[in-house]
Amino acid sequence: MSDTESTPPAQKVTKDEIIAAINQICEKRGQPVVRLGDIADVDSIDVGKQAIKKHLDELQEMGRVNFLEYGQAGVWWTPEGVDTDSEIDGVIDWDAVDADEIPLDILAEFPEFQEQTYWEGARDTWGTVSVGAFFLVFVTALVEIFRQNTPVQLGPNAQEFISIVAVGGFSVALLSLGLVFAMRAMQWLEVQGILEVPRQGYRTVKHSAVRAIQDRLPDLDS
């Protein structure tokens, strides 16, 4: 089999398809703007986010789409697709909106566009773990109450297993709950800009280390 037969053809998408995808998402979800990830999730768009972003940047230069930095990645919309005689979900009055930008205070009415930060994602993950661990402890407590109030006798291995599950579940629950509060604290520090100081220091040290290594490498071009 030749290389041309074994290699799948490269997927392409046109700018008109990007525009159509944006309008399709807005109409289907009843929302005024879309995120890059929303466009990438459309079935008819068979390219990656990098290719989509390139098209969006070019479309923005052409004036066919607008962009606003919001959340982690920003949001996009097509100004020519906006019906200025109506409101979307009763929230955005397009007659009062600048044609080139959606004010952040209006966009804030749509929290689904705020992509989670690393700390928010970690907080939600550990919160889920803590809920599951506490549920496990609750179940083992019910089993123990049932055992003490019924003539049913469990063997020593079963009792030991229940005790291990209860202690382990309680330990995991406390640990994960502590991590939830730690993630909240880290999120607050990031919002306040406090984390940027050690982060900048880390970048400086890393850059200096890389430069020092590069300076010691032999010059292969000579």
Image (tube, helix red, strand yellow):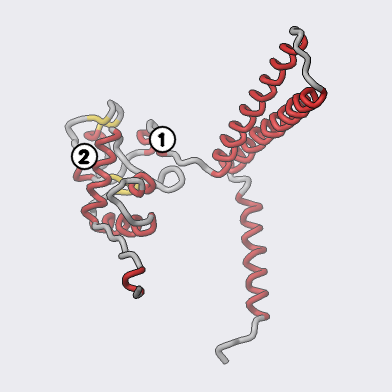
Mark 1 vs mark 2, CA separation in Å:
20 Å
Left or right: 215, with 100 as reference point: right
Q: Residue type at mark 2?
A: Val
Q: Where is residue 70 drawn, in percent x and y?
A: 41, 43
In the rendered structure, find residue 112 and report the number of the disc placed on it. 1
Left or right: 162, with 84 as reference point: right
Q: Residue at x 36, y 36 (%)?
A: 107
Left or right: 1, with 172 as reference point: left
Which tag is nearer the camera, tag 1 or tag 2? 1
Helix, strand, or loop for circle 1?
helix
Q: Determine crowd level at label 2: few under 14, some 14-19, many 20+ residues with C-alpha closer than 10 A.
A: some
Helix, strand, or loop for circle 2?
loop
Which one is nearer the viewer's eye here, 61 or 141?
141
Which one is nearer the viewer's eye here, 47 or 192?
47
**Residue linked to disc 2:** 82
Q: Where is residue 177 drawn, in percent x and y?
A: 67, 30
